[in-house]
Image: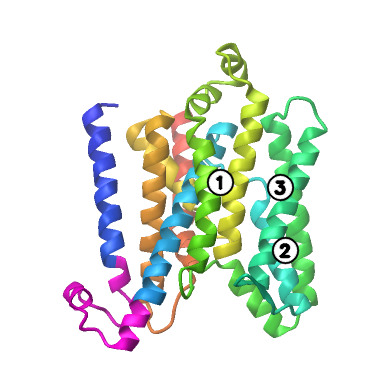
Amino acid sequence: MSRSRTATFLVGLLAALALTVLLAPLAGMKGYLPWDVLSGSLTSVDEGIFWKVRVPRVLLALVAGAALALSGMTFQSMFRNALATPYTLGVASGGSFGAALTVKLGFTFSIAGLPASSLGAFLGCLLAVTLVYGVTRLKQGFSTATMLLAGVAVGFLFSSLLMFLQYMSDFAETFRIVRWLMGGLDVVGYRHVLELLPLVLVGAAAVFLHLRELNLLVTGDDLAAGRGVDVTAVRRRLFFATSLMVGGVVAACGPIGFVGMMAPHICRLIIGADHRLLAPAAVLLGAVFLAVCDTVARTLIAPAEIPVGVITALLGGPFFLWLLTRGASERA
């Protein structure tokens, strides 16, 4: 891959990020002009909508999209499978069950500003991670095959429990559960952003410190071990780093799908598989992609709003099929 093409792509992503930050908060049921915001000519109501609703929402979309894309890239490299997603190991299913359980039990409290559904989702994610880690530890070596099978089994377990809760819920509870499962970024104020940001920064720092190891893991465990990589330790660190980010995103936004599969794969097609370039590109594209999807979700049928998870699924479904058909045509 030529350096000029890579540099052009990264600069384009930075420009797209800047435009998204500047323009996305202006769009909505009532659009604002940039000079109205800069000159302070907005009414107090419009000013509150802009600074306390739209700007935090765009920032949350940027942070969540970056975390999902980076987690997806890590899982795709660890499992050497372009179809892997941040939810491959059952974290989203655990979070969904935790959130649904709080709805079914009627919990309405909040701790430090976090609603019960978010707390339940985060605890569910932690439980799923603990189960996957415990099952994987039962076998020697912390292998990707065991981890993947454990994640699938845990995901099915929590999915079945979630279906049981939905069956036992009344109409109002079922509606709340289904709406949460669609994912959303409807926040007021910066609390959710500030609570999610430390989790993402810690997880992202751990991933960026292991980009060399990721490059070697893609070639195979034996070759990576031959080049001095402690495969088991690195895989364990990456597992917890990505789970921390994904758990935080699911707790704050619900299970927003396909961002973690699409963004890193698109970047890999354009700039190659070198994670020193792929990681920052995936972070930028994931952030921009989710922010743009959310902007479309809240403006397409305004004043009503489409859950952002619906928009990402509408785009991700065809992309998933394209990946499958592309792989089949390459093997033919």
* Residue 326 visible at all: yes
Residue of label 2: 97
Image coordinates for residue 158, horizontal then vertical, percent: 75, 57
Q: Position of residue 160 (x, y in %)?
A: 77, 60
**198 is higher (above) or lower (below) than 118:** above
Query: Mark 1 and mark 2: span between their CA atoms?
Result: 19 Å
* Residue 111, image quadrant: bottom right
Type of amino acid under label 1:
Thr
> Nearer the N terminus, badge 1 or badge 3?
1
- The first of marks 1 and 2 along the sequence is 1
Q: Nearer the viewer, mark 1 or mark 3?
A: 3
Tag in front: 1 or 2: 2
Along the viewing direction, whichever of 17 and 180 lies nearer the viewer: 17
Please tell me the numbered disc located at residue 129: 3
Q: Between residue 45 and residue 184, name the one nearer to us.
A: 45
Q: Amino acid at mark 2?
A: Phe
Q: CA distance from mark 1 to mark 3?
A: 15 Å
Q: Which residue is mark 1?
A: 85
In this rendering, the answer to whether 59 lies above or below 332 is: below
Q: Point out the stretch of residues depicted in magenta.
A: 24-50
Residue 113, disc:
none
Callout 3 amino acid: Val
Q: Residues within 10 Å of mark 1 (few under 14, many from 20)?
A: many
**Chain-order first, disc 2 or disc 3:** 2
Distance from the alpha carbon under mark 2 to that under mark 3: 13 Å
User: In the shown orientation, is residue 186 left or right of residue 39?
Assistant: right
Verify whether residue 46 appears in magenta.
Answer: yes
Q: Residue at point 54% right, 61% down?
A: 195
Q: Residue at x 30, y 61 (%)?
A: 21
- Rate crowding at label 3 as few (under 14), some (14 to 19) or many (20 or more) other CA atoms within 10 Å: many
